[in-house]
Image: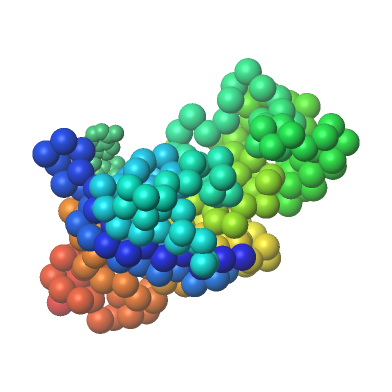
Amino acid sequence: MPDLTLTSVAKSFGSNAVLHDLDLHVDEGEFFTLLGPSGCGKSTTLWSIAGLHSPDRGTIAFGDRVVFDGGRIDVPPERRNCGVVFQSYAVWPHLSVHDNVGYPLKLRRVGHAARAARVREVLDLVELGAYEKRYPHELSGGQQQRVALARALAHQPDLLLLDEPFSNLDAKLRERAREWLRALQQRIGVTTVFVTHDQDEALSMSDRLLVMDQGRVRQIGTPEEVYRIPADEFVADFVGTVN
Ligand code: ADP
Ligand code: MG
């Protein structure tokens, strides 16, 4: 399981500068959260890590392996070995649960028997062992997100990247999903970057979090540090500390 390092990562869309020389380091096995208001650049950061966007400058490394270095190195997404769960369009409606989860393995040309075994294993992990033959429309929103998570984990990714995975769930389900996901992450120990605009989610789930504002880091710390000793007024406001 590698760690993750971003050094001076910058990204603009046209004249809109979205990431300003972003530096961050995620430890091996850590649950690390990017927290900030809508539009601050969280998804752009996650997509850059996954290889779905190319930054304009900077370096991204998984352990010793540099996956992006300015224009010189830009490893394509399928060779970065990330598992990604997006906010919406999480699962393919026309594929069964089995085929959704098995898809990344099929892409990697894993044989039929090994694929079936791994799909079963990973569906058990997300507690959906009995749902293999179902289709997404037969599942609840929460179950569909668990299918998406199983798919992200199927090929044993080095990094798990989660972009607001609970945003389509209602408040009660969301709270249960938090605890459940955190317990699962600890059990498998996968290095995780979690994106949210929800301060409660960030404070309750993370080993450490990064508070982001307009593509800049305001603070990086444990939930305790960020909550008790906010670096500035923005952080204090955003995490809801009264000062
Ligand atoms: P967040 O995930 O924190 O809500 P994003 O990373 O999605 O923020 O977006 C940050 C900024 O980048 C926004 O101003 C958004 O409009 C812009 N942006 C994101 N993706 C694109 C894109 N593909 N093309 C142009 N602008 C984009
Ligand atoms: Mg986003």
Q: In x, y percent, where is residue 112?
A: 84, 32
Left or right of 238? Residue 54 is right
- The image quarter containing residue 129 is top right
Q: In x, y percent, where is residue 93?
A: 59, 21
Q: In x, y percent, where is residue 63?
A: 52, 66
Residue located farthest toward the right when viewing the structure as drawn: 113
Q: Report the coloring of the rendering.
A: rainbow
Question: Does the image show residue 130?
Answer: no
Please tell me whether residue 14 is drawn above or below residue 154 in the rendered image.
Answer: above
Please tell me whether residue 222 is drawn above or below residue 115 in the rendered image.
Answer: below
Please tell me whether residue 132 is drawn above or below residue 73 in the rendered image.
Answer: above
Q: Nearer the viewer, residue 170 or 67?
A: 67
Residue at 59%, 57% in the rendered image: 158
Residue at 69%, 45% in the rendered image: 154
- The image quarter containing residue 222 is bottom left
Question: Does the image show residue 57?
Answer: yes
Q: Quadrant of ligand 1?
A: top left
Residue at 16%, 46% in the rendered image: 17
Left or right of 231? Residue 190 is right
